[in-house]
Amino acid sequence: MKTKIIILIFVFAAISVTAKLQSDPLTKKEKPKSYIEKDRERWEPYYIDVQPNKTVDSWKVPFETSNRFKLNTIRVISKFGDPRLTFLKNHIHPAIDIVPAKPGELITVYPVAIGVVCSIHLGDPYKTVVIKHIMQDKSIIYSSYKHLQEIYVRNGTQVDQNTKLGRLYTHAEAQKLKGNYDHLHFEVRKSFDDFGCASWLTMTKEELNKYFYNPLDFLKNNLGVINIIPAGRK
Ligand SMILES: [Zn+2]
């Protein structure tokens, strides 16, 4: 009886060693973690899981222009999808960099739609506010506003298109910091699973497509009032 048990233990140990060897990460080819996957946890503490009180009923440009439904009231300085040499070499720019077409001295930034502030992260000169929006079909979209010199909202603030989120750097302030930070880095996001770091760690077209919409196309296609279908009618 004792011998049988010893043999059984031996066989069991042999099987588990074999299984372990087979699952050894060195013998099996595993996909290396992306920069985004490695870094995302660091940014999670800045995120809060809140729901917007109201659904999106229109989209506007994020500045106080002569007509916030018109795309030609903003000027695009830098495009979506361009390779970038700053921070992480060759990361993809997942935003558009914009200013009002007729900028004043101090430029205030407003939400593109109604929603709730779900993340405020980074420091000067990259301070960022992220807004979570809920659509009529219950899907979620995020908009993100980077390079704010001052921020006037907090995590959890319910915002509409007239809420002042913050203001941009003036040209003089940006020069003092030795960078061209006097514009809004504006993103429209499909996902915020990265808690913000995909903004500077997107290295592939797949990642770009996973997290971001082309914000210029998005504004082109959506600026204006959304037609609301009255309940009970189709
Ligand atoms: Zn940018």
Image (cartoon, rainbow, N blue to C red):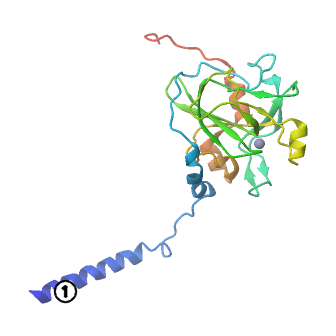
For disc 1, the marked residue is 7
Residue 186 as seen in the image, left or right of residue 157 = right
Nearer the observer, 206 or 86: 86
Nearer the observer, 150 or 44: 150
At label 1, counting other C-alpha atoms closer than 10 Å, the crowd grade (few under 14, some 14-19, many 20 or more) is few
- Give the mark count: 1
The residue under label 1 is which amino acid type?
Answer: Ile
Nearer the observer, 95 or 164: 164
Q: Position of residue 223 (x, y in %)?
A: 69, 22
Residue 89 location, quadrant: bottom right
The quadrant in which the N terminus is found is: bottom left
Residue 41 as seen in the image, left or right of residue 58 = left
**Residue at the spot 79% in from the left edge and 54% down from the top edge:** 86
Q: Position of residue 160 (x, y in %)?
A: 63, 22
In the image as oriented, which residue stretches furthest toward the left?
1
The image quadrant in which ligand 1 is located: top right
**Residue at the spot 42% in from the left edge and 72% down from the top edge:** 23
In the image as oriented, which residue stretches furthest toward the bottom?
3
Nearer the observer, 144 or 94: 144
Residue 43 as seen in the image, left or right of residue 178 = left
**Residue at the spot 64% in from the left edge and 49% down from the top edge:** 197
Q: Position of residue 206 (x, y in %)?
A: 62, 49
**Residue at the spot 61% in from the left edge and 43% down from the top edge:** 211
Q: Is residue 182 above or below residue 2?
A: above
Q: Is residue 6 above or below residue 144?
A: below
Q: Is residue 112 above or below residue 177?
A: above
Q: Which structural element holds mark 1?
A: helix
Residue 111 location, quadrant: top right
Q: Position of residue 44 (x, y in %)?
A: 56, 48
